[in-house]
Image (cartoon, rainbow, N blue to C red):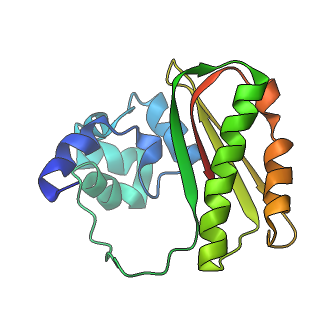
Amino acid sequence: MTPEMGPAWVKTLPVGRFHGVGPVTTKRMQALGIQTGADLRAKSPAFLQAHFGSTVAWCHAIARGEDDRPVDPDRTRSSSGSATTFDCDLVDPAGIEAGVLQMADDVWAWCEKAQAFGRTVTVKVKFGEFRQITRSRTLAAAITEHAQLLQGASTWPGRSTPPGRASDWSA
């Protein structure tokens, strides 16, 4: 994404996806009719000050795609992820399991190569109607064996969730 593309992208971004906007603030914004970056941008600094207090400058800036935090392109990567979009919703439990296990294998390949092992495994499932769920598990110790990751993958609630079209796995 180039800097020129930022403003158009920010306009369509749901407010809950902005850095620094957590679940409580997201609900407050949505209750005020602020659903997207465009909605946030349309609000005056006075309105933002009245409803969000000291975060007014931050809200005003992020709604315009302004973020002065430094970017370190050489920082050490701390997690690995695998994302797949399937041609159609997966409804068959065997198909869901096969997709999840393949993504777990992809994540494990990176973990093993980088010798970076985490304790938290996150699975995100997106559905055809653009709804998504995220499930996360944090273990007491780092997952240091492929079998541990596969065990987590095989016990994930894939069979109890509605059909999914896209899925992300990260560790």
Along the viewing direction, whichever of 92 and 69 lies nearer the viewer: 92
Q: Residue at x 61, y 56 (%)?
A: 106
- Residue 21: horizontal and vertical position, in percent? 47, 52
Corner quadrant of residue 149: bottom right
Name the side, left or right, on which 162 lies relative to 44.
right
Look at the image and tell me whether residue 127 can be seen: yes
Corner quadrant of residue 40: top left
Q: Residue at x 80, y 73 (%)?
A: 144
Q: Quadrant of the N terminus?
A: bottom left
Look at the image and tell me whether residue 43 can be seen: no
Name the side, left or right, on which 129 lies relative to 133.
left
Name the side, left or right, on which 53 lies relative to 66.
right
Name the side, left or right, on which 80 lies relative to 34.
right
Say above or below: 58 vs 161.
below
Q: Residue at x 54, y 36 (%)?
A: 27
Q: Residue at x 46, y 58 (%)?
A: 20
Q: Quadrant of the C terminus?
A: bottom right
